Amino acid sequence: MTRQQVLDLYFLDARHKLIEIAAFLDRMERASGKDDFRFQAFKTALGELSGAKKQKAKNILLAFSDHSTKPIEKAPGKGAVGACPGK
């Protein structure tokens, strides 16, 4: 596709998602308490969007991923949280 075709097809959806992210960041700034590993991973992922880096989607997925190679004995909970708690 040409850039014009990509813009025609995806611009409004991307614009909507960007506004949603900005609203989330506004809520986080107004909220009290401390950040946890999820917001730290989120900020790392946001950094992957800047500049001329290639494979932005891959790098964002990796920012949220668990890079450990050893299995754990027991899961800490029943549900996914969307980011790796780290070491």
Image (cartoon, rainbow, N blue to C red):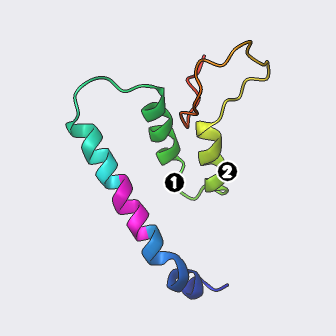
Q: In the rendering, which numbered label is found on residue 74? A: none
Whether residue 17 sits left or right of residue 79 in the image: it is left
Front one among 34 and 73: 73
* Quadrant the C terminus occupies: top right
Give me the residue at 54% from left, 48% from top: 48
Residue 33 appears at what percent x and percent y?
26, 23
Determine if the magenta segment contains residue 30.
Answer: no
Residue 46 falls left or right of residue 6: left
Position of 2 with respect to 18 (left or right) is: right
Query: Which element is circle 1 on?
Result: loop
Residue type for callout 2: Lys
Q: Nearer the viewer, mark 1 or mark 2?
A: 2
Highlighted range, magenta = 15-21
Q: Is residue 17 magenta?
A: yes
Judge whether 1 appears above or below 42 on screen.
below
Query: Disc 1 or 2, which lies upstream in sequence?
Result: 1
Q: Residue 53: give x, y in percent of width and height.
A: 61, 55
Query: Whole-Å distance between the Cαs marked 1 and 2?
Result: 11 Å
Write down the residue under mark 1: 49
To which residue does mark 2 refer?
A: 58
Bin the neighbour count of mark 2 within 10 Å (Cα to Cα): few under 14, some 14-19, many 20 and up. Answer: few
